[in-house]
């Protein structure tokens, strides 16, 4: 049986603040199998931002173990974590994080410039294919200011997909979008999920979580609810 994409075992994260200590995560156990689409929710201070940073290999746990696609990443060096992020994780952010003076195609090509192992043999062709997958095959040369908010997020999704990651990690991906565009972007995520991708979406919106197949809720650094459910079908299309 293939290893889970995400396996967290007793994950804890503590932060020193002067003479005191803040415990952001108190022992999180979580498994995400290949092909799941999971929403992570929680109020401010619940630990979801800390968990997001750990899932994205942007931070290390104080205790516990994190296995990403079968590799224990908990104690890897900075260089090794950088390679793991580039190879195993695709990031989608609330603010899109696109280079303003760069075309959609060059924005999507960017992660491949840091692929030290050259896993993608034809980067330009891969970037074009990723943009076609998100419905922007006709916008290759457009700059972000020539695209709508929804189209910019599509470019961000294409950039996240171009390295063929084991995990697509989205941080409040619809936070800057109106209701109609939110549904369109969630339809895109559902189509990516239907194609076999594993997604974790961090959100504070119940509507966004309703489009996922599973919801995990954090409170005070612990998982208080973890349930699978039938996903609402988004009405948009790529």
Image (tube, rainbow, N blue to C red):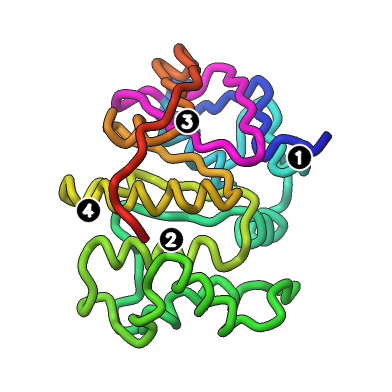
- Which secondary structure dominates the residues rendered in magenta? strand
- Residue most toward the top? 224
Of labels 4 and 1, the one closer to you? 4
Secondary element type, mark 3: loop
Q: Which mark is residue 113?
A: none
Q: Which residue, given by chain and number where applicable, does mark 2 sit on?
A: 157
Residue 10 in magenta? no
Neighbour class for label 4 at 10 Å: few (<14), some, many (≥20)?
some
Q: Nearer the viewer, residue 39 or 189?
A: 189
Q: Which residue, given by chain and number where applicable, does mark 1 sit on?
A: 72
Q: Which residue, given by chain and number where applicable, does mark 4 sit on?
A: 181
Tell me the CA gap for discs 4 and 1. Answer: 37 Å
Residue at 73%, 72% (x, y): give it: 119
Residue at 55%, 71% (x, y): give it: 111
Of labels 2 and 1, the one closer to you? 2
Quadrant in the picture for residue 106? bottom left
User: Which quadrant is home to the C terminus?
Assistant: bottom left
Residue at 37%, 73% (x, y): give it: 136
For marks 3 and 2, the one nearer the N-term is 2
- Residue most toward the right? 1
Q: Which mark is residue 213?
A: 3
Q: Which residues are magenta?
A: 24-46
Tell me the CA gap for discs 3 and 2. Answer: 19 Å
């Amino acid at each position: 049986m293939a290893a889970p994409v995400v396996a967290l075992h007793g994950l804890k994260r503590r932060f020193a603040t002067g003479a005191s200590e803040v415990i952001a995560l108190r022992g999180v156990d979580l498994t995400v199998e290949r092909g799941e689409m999971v929403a992570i929710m929680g109020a401010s201070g619940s630990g979801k931002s800390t968990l997001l940073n750990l899932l994205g290999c942007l931070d290390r746990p104080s205790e516990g173990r994190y296995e990403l696609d079968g590799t224990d990443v908990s104690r890897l060096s900075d260089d090794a974590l950088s390679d793991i992020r580039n190879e195993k994780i695709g990031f989608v952010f609330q603010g899109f994080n696109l280079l303003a003076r760069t075309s959609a195609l060059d924005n999507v090509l960017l992660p491949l410039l840091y692929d030290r192992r050259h896993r993608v043999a034809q980067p330009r062709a891969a970037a074009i294919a990723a943009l076609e997958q998100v419905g922007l095959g006709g916008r290759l040369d457009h700059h972000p200011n020539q695209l709508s908010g929804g189209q910019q997020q599509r470019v961000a999704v294409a950039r996240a997909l171009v390295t063929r990651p084991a995990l697509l990690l989205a941080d409040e991906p619809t936070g800057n979008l109106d209701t109609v565009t939110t549904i369109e972007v969630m339809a895109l995520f559902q189509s990516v999920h239907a194609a076999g991708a594993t997604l974790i979406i961090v959100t504070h919106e119940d509507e966004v979580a309703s489009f996922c197949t599973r919801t995990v809720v954090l409170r005070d650094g612990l998982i208080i609810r973890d349930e699978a459910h039938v996903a609402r079908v988004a009405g948009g299309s790529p």
